[in-house]
Image (cartoon, helix red, strand yellow):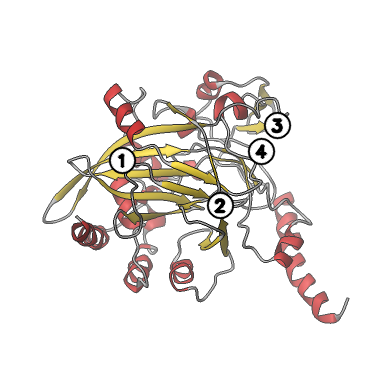
């Protein structure tokens, strides 16, 4: 091995080894997870989750706009969260002592407010033939700007995958090094943040589609960034390995992505320049449509609100399994209308990056100023009105 490649190897492995040593000696408090950010308490006080499933007329609306999901070749497929994933595993406490060795929906809900708990999935291949389940929910929120209020109905569909991998566009040499210490196709257990949300206006007309991508979302304005087919069923591609969701395009398509939507990441995603360290390309190749069942849960269900980990806790940062699917973004950005406008961006959108720079100074404090909400909102409403 020549000196150049030896230096590259050292530069990559030394930080990784350092991280592993630190994790071994400086064990984090298992009770402190993302779900314990203080802003979530305030958010759920203002937006208490419903303790019953959607009403009959709401279910009709959710069925009307069912998304169509397309998988790439050789993808292991979507799953049934409770009958497959949760049925195969055990629940342990903060000290990793066994609590329950056979877990079901009732058990998981009993312990949903235990942030130190973790569910450890053990795939035995027993339920792989079960039909996948997508969970539908409905929320209502109003975008309040200085001159007008805009009420919206939000239809959200969560599709579930057993594991999540890194973006397929990570360079091969980086994948090779990472695979020395972890699986790049099984980076963490469970992917259930993977959701599509359709926003309807006060006349129940479709306005926008928001899709989860890594630790951020992207809003597509109907008629401008995405088209709604005549059957009202938006087409969605599932990315290779990472499972992130994107508007359907034929063939193999590269999509710039990052771990978090920072100003640096936004520059890369929008302009393709200044690639941050935690950035890569997702790749989609949607060819096989998923045949699934639509089911409904109370918004208080553990699928949405579990405060511990819904998969095994792994030593390398970023490989921990997620909590309930409702903990999908910062508390400051959680209200549905705010999520929609905040993550809306245009082509060559320098203004979005400027606004993101300002927002990033306060969003960790669970706050977005009224001036910023107004600025993000006016951009969205202006483009929406042009498409009406």
Q: Which of 174 and 65 is in front in this view?
A: 65
Q: To which residue does mark 4 refer?
A: 312
Other-residue count near label 1 (Cα within 10 Å), few / some / many at <14 / 14–19 / ≥20: many
Locate residue 115: give its quadrant: top right
Between the C-alphas of marks 2 and 4, the distance is 23 Å
Residue 248: image x %, image y %? 46, 52
Closest to the camera, between mark 4 and mark 1, is 1
Q: Which of 25 and 76 is in front in this view?
A: 76
Q: To which residue does mark 2 refer?
A: 239
Q: To which residue does mark 3 refer?
A: 123
Between the C-alphas of marks 3 and 2, the distance is 22 Å
Query: What residue is shown at x 70% (from left), y 58% (from top)?
Result: 19
Nearer the N terminus, badge 1 or badge 3? 3
Q: Which of 176 and 103 is in front in this view?
A: 176
Closest to the camera, between mark 2 and mark 4, is 2
Image quarter in which the C terminus is found: bottom left
- Assign a secondary structure to mark 4: loop
Between the C-alphas of marks 4 and 1, the distance is 32 Å
Closest to the camera, between mark 4 and mark 3, is 3
Q: To which residue does mark 1 refer?
A: 154
Residue 54: image x %, image y %? 33, 26
Between the C-alphas of marks 1 and 3, the distance is 34 Å
- Assign a secondary structure to mark 1: strand
- Assign a secondary structure to mark 3: loop
- One can see residue 159 in this view: yes
Nearer the N terminus, badge 4 or badge 1? 1
Residue 200: image x %, image y %? 26, 43
Q: Is residue 330 left or right of residue 167?
A: left
Between the C-alphas of marks 2 and 1, the distance is 24 Å
Closest to the camera, between mark 2 and mark 1, is 2
Other-residue count near label 4 (Cα within 10 Å), few / some / many at <14 / 14–19 / ≥20: many
């Amino acid at each position: 091995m020549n000196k150049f490649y030896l230096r590259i190897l050292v530069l990559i492995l030394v930080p990784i080894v350092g991280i592993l040593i630190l994790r071994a000696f400086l064990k984090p408090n298992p009770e402190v997870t993302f779900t314990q950010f203080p802003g979530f308490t305030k958010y759920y006080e203002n937006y208490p989750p419903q303790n019953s499933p959607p009403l009959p007329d709401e279910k009709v609306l959710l069925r009307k706009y069912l998304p169509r999901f397309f998988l790439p070749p050789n993808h292991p497929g979507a799953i049934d969260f409770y009958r497959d994933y949760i049925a195969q595993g055990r629940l342990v406490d903060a000290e990793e002592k066994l609590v329950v060795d056979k877990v079901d929906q009732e058990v998981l809900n009993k312990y949903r407010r235990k942030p130190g708990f973790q569910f450890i999935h053990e795939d035995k291949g027993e339920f792989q033939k079960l039909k996948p389940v997508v969970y539908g929910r409905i929320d209502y929120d109003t975008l309040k700007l200085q001159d007008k209020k805009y009420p919206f109905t939000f239809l959200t569909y969560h599709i579930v995958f057993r594991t999540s991998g890194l973006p397929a566009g990570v360079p091969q040499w980086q994948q090779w090094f990472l695979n020395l210490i972890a699986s790049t196709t099984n980076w963490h257990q469970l992917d259930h943040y993977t959701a599509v949300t359709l926003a309807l206006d006060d006349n129940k007309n479709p306005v926008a589609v928001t899709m989860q991508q890594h630790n951020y979302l992207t809003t597509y304005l109907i008629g401008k960034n995405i088209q709604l087919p005549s059957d009202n069923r938006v087409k969605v591609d599932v990315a290779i390995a990472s499972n992130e969701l994107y508007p359907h395009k034929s063939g193999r398509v590269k999509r710039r992505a990052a771990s978090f939507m920072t100003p640096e990441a936004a520059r890369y995603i929008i302009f393709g320049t200044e690639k941050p360290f935690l950035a890569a390309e997702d790749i989609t190749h949607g060819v096989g449509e998923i045949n699934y069942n639509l089911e409904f849960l109370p918004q208080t269900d553990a699928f949405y609100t579990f405060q511990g980990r819904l998969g095994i806790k792994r030593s390398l940062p970023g490989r921990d399994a997620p909590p309930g699917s409702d903990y999908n973004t910062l508390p400051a950005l959680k209200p549905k209308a705010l999520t929609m406008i905040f993550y809306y961006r245009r082509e060559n959108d320098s203004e979005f990056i400027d606004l993101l720079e300002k927002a990033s100074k306060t969003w960790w404090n669970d706050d977005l100023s009224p001036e910023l909400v107004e600025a993000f909102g006016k951009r969205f409403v202006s483009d929406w009105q042009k498409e009406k």
